[in-house]
Image (cartoon, rainbow, N blue to C red):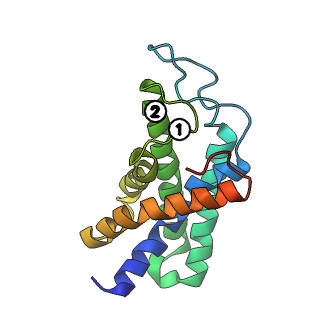
Amino acid sequence: MSLSSLLWAFWYILPAYFANASPVLVGGGRPIDGGRYWKDGRRVFGDGKTWRGLIGGVAIGTAVGALQYFITPEFYGSLGKALLLAFLLSFGALFGDLVGSFFKRRIDLPRGSPAIGLDQLGFLISALAFAYPVKTLDSGQIIFLLVVSPFVHWGANYFAYKMGWKSVPW
């Protein structure tokens, strides 16, 4: 696996990274679950998953993909494909985060509690699955992202914590 191939994998996943990180800045407002409870008596997702965070995160991730297209159009082939891929990566990342929140509520983890593995990889796996029909990576690139993404996630969360955007560093 060449360094170039690994860098392209990182370039590919950037919309998902930005989408996953941006609800901290653009979120708030009405919860996606509308305050509803699941059969177990716990919130479906909780107050931390909002429509504004979802829509804003997808928009930011998609905008990152558009910017990427103008920097490296050969990677995508067309602006339409770049926007579709960025949208799918972004929505997929936030969908994976929602699924993670759902499972965290089922095991009674409060909002903001860490779930090692789920927090760092759920968004990534979902993003890759959503984007698969449009453009995919080879197995080596996927393994690289599975290894590096937890460190990117932890670093981004720590940075957001130090900036005062998050109340916890994970």
* Res. 111 in view: yes
- Label 2 neighbourhood size at 10 Å, few (<14), some (14-19), many (20+)? many
Tell me the crowding category of disc 1: few under 14, some 14 to 19, or many 20 or more residues within 10 angstroms, Cα based.
few
Q: Which residue is mark 2?
A: 104
Report the front residue among 44 and 147: 147
Real-space CA distance between mark 2 and mark 1, rounded to the nearest whole angstrom: 8 Å
Where is residue 65 shown, x and y percent of the image?
57, 68
Q: Which quarter of the picture shows residue 4?
A: bottom left
In the picture of the structure, the residue carrying the numbered disc 1 is 113
Q: Residue at x 42, y 32 (%)?
A: 103
Q: Is residue 19 left or right of residue 166?
A: left
Answer with left or right where residue 30 lies relative to residue 100: right
Q: Is residue 45 above or below residue 121?
A: above
Q: Residue at x 58, y 39 (%)?
A: 112
Image quadrant in which the N terminus is located? bottom left
Vertical order, 137 against 118 (above or below):
below
Which of pointers 2 and 1 lies earlier in the amino acid sequence? Answer: 2
Q: Disc 2 vs disc 1: Cβ atoms closer than 8 Å? A: yes
Which-is-in-front pick, marks 2 and 1? 1
Q: Which residue is found at the position 66% from the left and 54% from the top?
A: 161
137 is higher (above) or lower (below) than 94? below
x, y (%) of residue 104?
46, 32
In this rendered view, identify the residue nearer to me: 165 or 134. 165
Q: Where in the figure is residue 142, as x and y percent of width and height?
A: 32, 66
Q: Is residue 135 visible?
A: no
